[in-house]
Image (tube, rainbow, N blue to C red):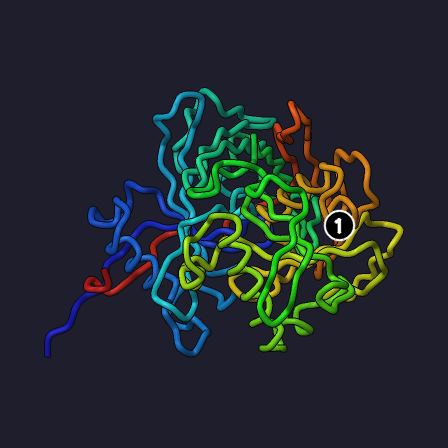
Amino acid sequence: MTHTPQIKIPATYMRGGTSKGVFFRLQDLPVSAQVPGAARDALLLRVIGSPDPYGKQIDGMGGATSSTSKTVILAKSARPEHDVDYLFGQVSIDKPFVDWSGNCGNLSAAVGSFAIASGLVDPARVPANGIATVRIWQANIGKTIIAHVPMTHGEVQETGDFELDGVTFPAAEVKLEFIDPAAEEEGGGGAMFPTGNLVDDLDVPGIGVLKVTMINAGIPTIFVDAQAIGYTGTELQDAINGDPAALARFETIRAHGALRMGLISHLDEAAKRQHTPKVAFVAKPASYVSSSGKKVAAGDIDLLVRALSMGKLHHAMMGTAAVAIGTAAAIPGTLVNLAAGGGEKSSVRFGHPSGTLMVGAQAQQVDGDWSVTKAIMSRSARVLMEGFVRVPGDAF
């Protein structure tokens, strides 16, 4: 009986923010997977363990959640004033596809660390001690991210006392700047507000007309008022993810919002574009107990936000969605801004299922159009395992 041997591919398993993913250098991938296409997608699906009808990804590196079914490919950048090109693939758990339509803000926190440790950054730009500034080109959305990575004795510092709600243990703080974060999505015209409005009426079959703020910043996101869809904004994962009817309603909102934003041309296309846009619901501050048992007081936050990723309520907050939250909060009149009390804001602290997060944004209005020069937030990152992943040689 013949068999196909496994092949070894250099890889690093990393946590970035509240996500985990498998990181590769482009040059280390098999030749057929070094270019976009079916071979690359098939390889990454096999690495992660998808598609898995059991939804567990037992035979791969995935963790059976949208936060842990992720892949990253990095290469030294030939683009002026950039150090590394960062490509993110969101791997579907139960379906055979990889979504390349957006960024992962959480894993962005690990890109600088991996790039330095993997020799993708000019050593002359990396201090032995202090802060290394890594200039990242986010290839999925064509945007620049600046990562400020702490260095100690010539190595990336990963341990520290920075605490991030949604992550059990403290680590070193990595500050991220998302430059000009309004996403230039194909079909979306490159506008921060694709319809030209801060608030729109979105007619959703089976639900009715909803007031929504649809924004391209960090990642395309549809914001809706929690009360309008029967929620308080203090919900934890089980309240949403344990309700199939609720998940179906959110997917209907997402699909119709995607169509209105110009991200798809037909509703059927939404099923093949799970990573974007995101759907989030917002509410005014209220006290609640987070998933870890931590008490979050209404007086300690500016607003409540709950967001869905890949069809499920996220356990904390996606980094890219946090950029969208910070950006929308900075612009008077959006649903996010109104939930936070209205007026001009340069930063907000919002409550999510795992605790709280602060994000800042610099917004300005020029000739009636809003623009944001950058959004800022802090995350952390850590190498969990490094070496090789193995996949059957005929898997791609």
User: How far across and down, in percent of the image, does residue 210 sit?
Assistant: 67, 59
Residue of label 1: 350
Tell me which amino acid carries mark 1.
Phe
Residue at the spot x=79%, y=62% of the render? 294
Report x, y in % for residue 316: 65, 58
Residue density around tag 1, few if under 14, some if 14–19, many if 20 or more, within 10 Å? many
On the question of residue 382 being in view, the answer is: no
Where residue 137 sits in the image (x, y, percent)?
Answer: 44, 33
Residue pictured at 50% horizontal, 30% vertical: 134
Query: Of residues 66 and 332, which is closer to you in this image?
Result: 332
Residue 55 relative to residue 216: left or right: left
Asked which secondary structure carries label 1, the reply is strand
Q: Is residue 128 at all visible to an observer of this figure? A: yes
Q: Looking at the rendering, which quadrant does residue 278 occupy?
A: bottom right
Q: Is residue 373 above or below residue 193?
A: above
**Which sits in the foreground, 296 or 5?**
296
Tally of numbered tags: 1
Residue sitting at 24 percent across and 55 percent down? 39
Q: Is residue 93 left or right of residue 29?
A: right
Query: Is residue 193 found left or right of 39 in the rendered image?
Result: right
Identity of the residue furthest to the left in this view: 1
Quadrant of the image containing the N terminus:
bottom left
Identify the image quadrant of residue 395.
Answer: bottom left
Image quarter of the C terminus: bottom left
Residue 10 coordinates in the image, percent (x, y): 32, 49
Between 47 and 39, the residue placed more toward the observer is 39
